[in-house]
Image (cartoon, helix red, strand yellow):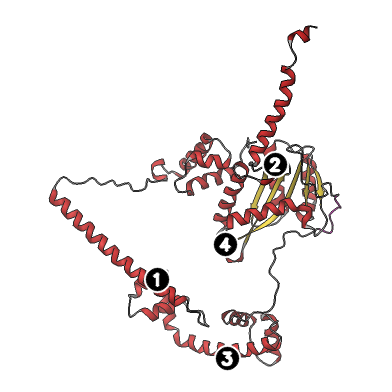
Amino acid sequence: MALKDYSDEFKADAVALYESTPGATYKSIAADLGVNRATLREWVLRDRTRRGVSAASAKPAVGHRAAVAPSDPDERVRQLEARVAELEASERKLATERDILRKAAKYFAGGDELVTSRFQFVDDHRATFEVKRLCQVLDVNRSSYYKWLAGAETRAARQREDQVLAQEIRQVHGESGGAYGSPRVTAELRDKGRQVNEKRVARIMRTYSITGIRLRRRIRTTVPDPASSPVEDLFQRDFTAVEPGRKYMGDITYLPLAGGKFLYLATVLDCFSRKIVGWSITDHMRTDLVADALRMAAGTRGSLDGAVFHSDHGAQYGSRSYASLCDQLGVTRSMGAVGTSADNAACESFHASLKRETLQGAHDYGNATTCRRTVFAWLTRYNTRRRHSTNNYLSPDEYERRHHTAKLTLVFPLVACVSPRSVES
């Protein structure tokens, strides 16, 4: 079923999705979001009015030319000649940039022991190309390049010192059987009388590809609260439901951003159709994250009274404020065993699908705005269009629609079968 009252955040995300999608139409975006085309258009126009942007300037047409060809043949010839000169200059510029990029591709793929900087590339090729053009193509600041050039002697001295330290690090690393990372290597060097900073050791180890044995980093989103009251497992790994709105599941997952940062997504999933009826995205994992997702679920369904909500033992789900919210909404809580992901398998599978299909092999979403927009678009399309194997390859919305239609079909034929004659008798 579609949302009746849309939050301001949902409206803002919908407008941002439409405005940022090239060639998008109200019809296509509205279909993905599961909203009425006219409703989306109203949101967009209202936002443009607020920003003082006209409809004509909001999405300029591609390839539009305002200039009208002059009637004077000589003037027309002069314009064409100027255009040809412009195109030739552009072609020369592109040819130069192409040559620079070809050399850069070979230069940076050389596999040198030391990481080669873009400044070094500019310095090595300044006799062939203009420094200005090199800096533009490689997206570096000219003043920064000249500053780097002025510090060449200091940098060379530091590189020689780093090479000496790298040999000492290799010796310590080899003696440990290749197991030591930068903290233990630093401690070993200090015991040998070498005064060195751990950050410098870590930098040199990265530069020379010296790595210790370590487990893959895992982002922990489930932190149990030892003070929370025990909650019974009412699901027992049964993630099915006979009706929408009876059984829900929830979980938190991390959304990686550039620079090692994260956003966090909390979801509320209906076990009947696997529809995401509530979600929330923030930069923290406080109780408000899961509470906002549950409130959105209540707004989507109209009521959660009598429903069962299943989660893991995260501190957010075990907090008193969250328990109080569930009591207010008439929700019965259920929790699986501690540390057992199989007790929340449906949510784990959903989050895995979300990251696989939105990241598409990338390590992160980039910045927070791009992440929110990408996940928002996928979540809404997941409900309205994405075919789900559990639903016989129907989308969650379509699966619920057919379920409601089937119920009506079972009820009304019984009324139609009662003839007037049988009623009179």
- Which residue corresponds to the image point at 52% horizontal and 87% vertical from the top-left? 159
Highlighted range, magenta: 225-231
The amino acid on which the numbered mark 3 sits, given as a three-letter code, is Val
Give the main secondary structure, helix, strand or loop, of the magenta stretch: loop
Q: Is residue 334 left or right of residue 177?
A: right
- Contact, CB < 8 Å: mark 2 with mark 4? no
Q: Is residue 149 left or right of residue 329?
A: left
Numbered tag placed on residue 164 in the rendering? 3
In this view, the mark in front (1 or 3): 1
- Callout 4: few (<14), some (14-19), or many (20+) C-alpha neighbours within 10 Å? few
Q: Nearer the viewer, residue 240 or 267?
A: 240
- Whichever of labels 1 and 2 marks the residue nearer the N terminus, that label is 1
Report how far apart the C-alphas of labels 3 and 4 lie in the structure: 37 Å
Q: Is residue 297 above or below residue 361?
A: above
Q: Nearer the viewer, residue 192 or 79?
A: 79
The amino acid on which the numbered mark 4 sits, given as a three-letter code, is Ala
The amino acid on which the numbered mark 2 sits, given as a three-letter code, is Ser
Q: Could you say where residue 73 lies in the image, as x and y percent from the top left? A: 13, 49
Q: Which residue is mark 4?
A: 362
Query: Helix, strand, or loop for circle 2?
Result: loop
Figure quadrant of the C terminus: top right
Numbered tag placed on residue 273 in the rendering? 2
